[in-house]
């Protein structure tokens, strides 16, 4: 079965500092990995995805993620955090082994960026 | 990006009544939509996969008679919580996959804004 794990329940960072939100994956076959962000009482917004190609993927709002096959990780990063980045972040893996290409999400990491 | 509209955003109902939540893809056709339930500790649980013109596929542990899903057209899926109870209170989110030219598996999901259900 495909799955992702987000080991940190919460990440605190000061504005202007770099941020990292961790994600590790467990998949059979090639991984299809995604990051989403959720603001309070809202749906999820797509940030970026890794399907194939360059290990460093750039996405929305200045976020990027690095695919590391040897460490089975897909950490989300941003060079300089903004207070407005404070939100809930979900890593997801797509299961393409079934008929419907389901997405499975990690438990989420709450990012707090302090002024 | 593609737009998925979910309605209502908030609903309060009495125990024992049924509530319908609609999910529409506004600018694309979605043969498959997914329904998630988000619990207070934030994790997202996939409830079911909604397929246009056929029966929904439910995840293990999700009661199909409790959570009725209908995918009436390529742009509309509905979730009906039947005989709702307080434990059904939750945040329900629908999503649809936007097809890309990259082949199966490459398209991302687009999400509705979610529906907060409170059962009194």
Image (cartoon, coloured by chain):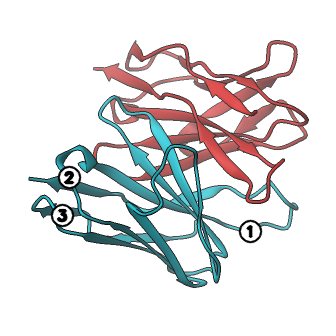
Chain colours: A red, B cyan
The C terminus of chain A lies in quadrant: top left
Q: Secondary structure at mark 3?
A: strand
Is residue B35 left or right of B81 when viewed as pictured? right
Q: Given contact means CB atoms under 8 Å apart, are the residues at marks 2 and 3 in contact?
A: no
- Give whichever of A28, B87 is nearer the camera: B87
Give the answer, above or below, for where B34 lies relative to A105.
below
- Whether residue A42 appears in this view of the structure is no
Q: CA distance from mark 2 to mark 3?
A: 13 Å
Task: Say if labels 3 and 1 share a chain.
Answer: yes
Outermost residue toward the bottom in this view: B73
**Residue marked by disc 1:** B99
Q: CA distance from mark 3 to mark 1?
A: 31 Å
Mark 1 / mark 2, whichever is N-terminal: 2
- Disc 1 crowd, CA 10 A, few/some/many (<14, 14-19, 20+): some
What is the chain letter for disc 1? Answer: B
Give the answer, above or below, for where A66 lies relative to B65.
above
**Residue marked by disc 2:** B85
How many numbered marks does the figure carry? 3
- Disc 3 crowd, CA 10 A, few/some/many (<14, 14-19, 20+): some
Q: CA distance from mark 1 to mark 2?
A: 36 Å
**Rendering coords of residue B61 (x, y %):** 50, 43
Q: Secondary structure at mark 2?
A: loop
**Rendering coords of residue B36 (x, y %):** 47, 51
Is residue B69 left or right of A101 when viewed as pictured? left
Q: Secondary structure at mark 1?
A: loop
Which of the two discs, 2 and 3, sits closer to the camera? 2
**Residue marked by disc 3:** B11
Residue A111: image quadrant is top left
What is the chain letter for disc 3? Answer: B
Kindly identify the residue that appears in the image at 56 percent across and 30 percent down.
A106
Mark 3 / mark 1, whichever is N-terminal: 3
């Amino acid at each position: 079965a495909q799955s992702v794990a987000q080991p940190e329940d919460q990440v605190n960072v000061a504005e202007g500092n770099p941020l990292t939100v961790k994600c590790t994956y467990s998949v059979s076959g090639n991984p299809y990995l995604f990051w989403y962000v959720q603001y309070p009482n809202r749906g999820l917004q797509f940030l970026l995805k890794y399907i194939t190609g360059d290990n460093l993927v750039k996405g929305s709002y200045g976020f990027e993620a690095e695919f590391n096959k040897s460490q089975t990780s897909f950490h989300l990063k941003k060079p300089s955090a903004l207070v407005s980045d404070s939100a809930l972040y979900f890593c997801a893996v797509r299961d393409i082994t079934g008929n419907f290409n389901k997405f499975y999400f990690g438990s989420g990491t709450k990012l707090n960026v302090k002024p | 990006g593609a737009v998925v509209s979910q309605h209502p955003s908030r609903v309060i109902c009495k125990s024992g009544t049924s509530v319908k939540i609609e999910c529409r893809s506004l600018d694309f056709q979605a043969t498959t939509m997914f329904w998630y339930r988000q619990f207070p500790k934030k994790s997202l649980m996939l409830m079911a996969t909604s397929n246009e013109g056929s029966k929904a596929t439910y995840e293990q542990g999700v009661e199909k008679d409790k959570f009725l899903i209908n995918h009436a057209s390529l742009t509309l899926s509905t979730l009906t919580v039947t005989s709702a109870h307080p434990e059904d209170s939750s945040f329900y989110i629908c999503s649809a996959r936007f097809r890309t030219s990259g082949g199966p598996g490459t398209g991302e999901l687009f999400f509705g804004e979610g529906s907060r259900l409170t059962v009194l």
